[in-house]
Amino acid sequence: MNYQSCEVQEHEKEALAELRILSMKESLEALGRFDPVRARSRFLVGFDREATRKIDVAGRLAGFYVIKDKGDHLYLDHLYIHPEFQGNGLGSKALKSIMAEAQERKLPLRLGALRGSRSNAFYRSHGFVQTHEEEWDIYYEYGR
C-alpha cells in the first residue's frame, strides 16, 4: 500500500487524538484501562506538531507517528494505524522509514508499547530488543 508522510497542521490534532483512541481501544480494554477522555487529554497536552507526521493514503488519514529527538537517541512516541488500514503492511512501511532515519542519523530508536498489545510482537518482528518493563509498558530499542 502506497502512502505519503505529511506534515501535520495544528487544527488536525483532534483527528489524531481520535485515531489514537480508536487504535488503542482494544489493548486498553483488555487491561481494563480504556478511558477515552484520559487518552484524548494525554495526547492533546503533549501534542508536538513539529515532531508529528501523518500517514496519508489516497487523501485519507490512515495513521500518524511522533518522533522525538532526545539527543542520544530518537524516541518513537506514537505510531498508530487506523484499524481500516491495519494488516496490509502500512505500519511496517512507516516503521522501516523511521528506522532508516535513525540509522542515517546514527542514533538508536527507542519506544514503549502497552503491555499485552499486539504492537509488542510487531516491534520484535522488526528487530527491536526489549530493554526493560514498567507496570503498564514494555520498552524496546533498535540500532544500538
Image (spheres, helix red, strand yellow):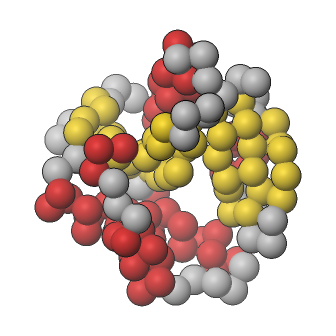
Residue 55 sits above or below residue 118 on the image: above
Q: Is residue 127 visible?
A: yes
Query: Looking at the picture, how far across and down is residue 78, in whole percent?
Result: 50, 52
The residue lying toward the viewer, choosing from 90 and 13, is 13
Residue 36 sits above or below residue 4 on the image: below
Query: Looking at the picture, how far across and down is residue 53, in whole percent?
Result: 33, 41
Quarter-wise, where is residue 103 in the image?
top right
Q: Quadrant of the C terminus?
A: top right
Residue shown at 81% from the left, 36% from the top = 129
Residue shown at 34% from the left, 26% from the top = 2
Residue shown at 42% from the left, 86% from the top = 37
Query: Looking at the picture, how far across and down is residue 1, in whole percent?
Result: 39, 29
Query: Looking at the picture, how far across and down is residue 131, in whole percent?
Result: 83, 44
The residue lying toward the viewer, choosing from 63 and 12, is 12
Residue shown at 35% from the left, 61% from the top = 47
Quarter-wise, where is residue 13 in the image?
bottom left
Residue 101 falls left or right of residue 107: left
